[in-house]
Amino acid sequence: MFTIGVITDQVSMDFEMALQFISDLGLQDIEVHALWNKNIEELNDEEVAEAHRLIQKYGMSVSLISSTIFLQCHLNENGKEFGSIDDYFITIAGSYDFHMNALRRCIELCSIFETDKIRTFGFIEEEALDENTVFQKVTDKLRDPVELVKEAGITLLLENCPHTRRRSTHGSSW
C-alpha cells in the first residue's frame, strides 16, 4: 500500500507545529529526522518521550527514522573534520564507531516509535577511488550495521546522496 508522508523538519523544527500542520493536511505518516534543532539520534530520553507523546496526540505513524548515519562518516578513517553540508540540514559527524553507536540508538528508537526502518547513507569519499574499490569498501563497512539491524528485525535503507561523493577538505561536493 502506498501512503503519502512528510519529513517533519521540512515543515518546522518545532515538532508540535509540524505535526499540527501535517494533521491539518489530513496526513498521518511521518519521517522523523530532526526536531527541536537536534537530530533524532541526539535526543535524550525525555525528548524522545515528549516526541512520542506528541506523535500519539496527533495520531501520527512513524514510517521511518530518517537518520543521517554514515552521511558525515569517512569511507577511509582519516581524522579530517567535516564541513557543514548546508545551513538547514542537520547531520551528525564522526568516526565509524560514533555512527555505529548512533545506529544502536536508532534501533532503540524504532521500538519506541513503532517503526522498522532506518535511513542511512553511504559514507564520504575524499580521495578518487575506482568504482569497484568504493563498492567493496562500502560493502565491508555496511556488513556490521546490516547484521545489527537484521538481529533487531529492522530494515536499513541506504539513501544515494550526492553529498557522499568525493568532497574537498572544505566540505563542498564535486
Image (cartoon, rainbow, N blue to C red):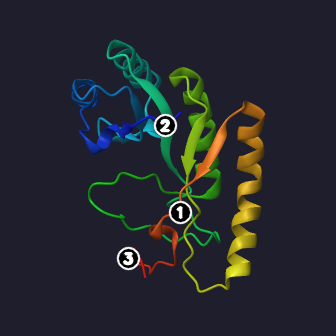
Q: Kindly indicate whether the residue at mark 1 contacts the one at mark 3 (C-beta within 8 angstroms).
A: no
Residue 82: image quadrant is bottom left
Residue 140 rendering spot, x and y as whole percentages: 77, 63
Between disc 3 and disc 1, the foreground one is: 1
The residue indicated by pointer 1 is 160
The residue indicated by pointer 2 is 2
The Cα atoms of the two marked residues, 3 and 2, are separated by 35 Å
Please name whichever residue, 169 or 28, is drawn nearer the observer in this view of the structure. 28
Residue 172 sits above or below residue 92 on the image: below
Residue 15 sits above or below residue 148 on the image: above
Q: Residue at x 65, y 52 (%)?
A: 97
Between disc 1 and disc 2, the foreground one is: 2
Looking at this rendering, what residue extends furthest in the front direction?
1
Badge 2 marks a residue whose secondary structure is loop
**First in residue order: circle 3 vs circle 1:** 1
Q: Residue at x 47, y 23 (%)?
A: 45
Q: Residue at x 46, y 70 (%)?
A: 162
Badge 3 marks a residue whose secondary structure is loop
**First in residue order: circle 3 vs circle 2:** 2
Question: What's under tag 1, amino acid-wise?
Answer: Asn
Residue 129 rendering spot, x and y as whole percentages: 65, 84
Question: What's under tag 3, amino acid-wise?
Answer: Ser
Question: What's under tag 2, amino acid-wise?
Answer: Phe
Numbered circle sitting on residue 172: 3
**Quick check: 137 left or right of 82?**
right
**Quick check: 32 left or right of 87?**
right
The Cα atoms of the two marked residues, 1 and 2, are separated by 21 Å
